[in-house]
Amino acid sequence: MEQTVFESIGYSAECQDCGEELECWGVQALVDGFLRWDTESMCSACGFAVAACGGDLPAELRGRLLSERGPARLGVDPSARNAAIMRVLRAALGLGLADVRSVLNEVLEGAHSGTMPEMEFLARRLRASGIDAVAARP
């Protein structure tokens, strides 16, 4: 069983009930081969609390994670066959043939980036297909 990979952040927002400062926490994790996220928010002034979770990472939380933690990059063995890499990327990202070519170029140039859980998700899929791949921060 592979290790869980996660990133978390704490941040503040305005409470939707009373307007005071809301304490918020956000997490994205790669658990058992699936990407998941969750957030929790709590207002110490009025007691308002909310929790949410799901599979597709909301853009706002993704932006916060990338801003605070920095992007991770996906690296692959340069001798790997492009067609094999493209098959994995298409399946993992749900891309069409036209879109996967630009992602392939980014991967080959070492420029494809995202959150650490996102890049480890792709690296694991590539390794499962026999392609040496690593997710790392520059």
Image: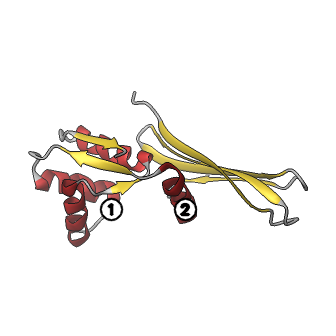
Q: Is residue 57 visible?
A: no
Q: Residue furthest bottom?
A: 98
Q: Secondary structure at mark 1?
A: loop
Q: Quadrant of the N terminus?
A: top left
Q: Any mark on residue 58, and which?
A: 2
Q: Which amino acid does the dot numbered 1 rest on? A: Gly
Q: Nearer the viewer, residue 106 or 17?
A: 106
Q: Indicate how the structure is coloured in the image.
A: secondary structure
Horizontal side, residue 98 vs residue 7: left or right: left
Q: Residue furthest right?
A: 46
Q: How many marks?
A: 2
Q: Nearer the viewer, residue 33 or 7?
A: 7
Residue 50, position as x, y percentages in the image = 75, 54
For the point 20% across and 56% down, which residue is it?
Answer: 109
Q: Secondary structure at mark 2?
A: loop
Horizontal side, residue 122 vs residue 87: left or right: right
For the point 88% across and 65% down, which residue is it?
Answer: 18
Residues tagged 1 and 2 counted as in contact (Cβ below 8 A):
no
Horizontal side, residue 14 vs residue 32: left or right: right
Residue under label 1: 94
Q: Callout 1: few (<14), some (14-19), or many (20+) C-alpha neighbours within 10 Å?
A: few
For the point 16% across and 43% down, which residue is it?
Answer: 77
For the point 50% across and 49% down, which residue is it?
Answer: 69
- Disc 1 to disc 2, how far (Cα)? 17 Å
Residue 115, position as x, y percentages in the image = 44, 51
Relative to 13, does residue 1 appear above or below in the rendering? above
Residue 6, position as x, y percentages in the image = 50, 41
Q: Nearer the viewer, mark 1 or mark 2?
A: 2
Q: Which amino acid does the dot numbered 2 rest on? A: Pro
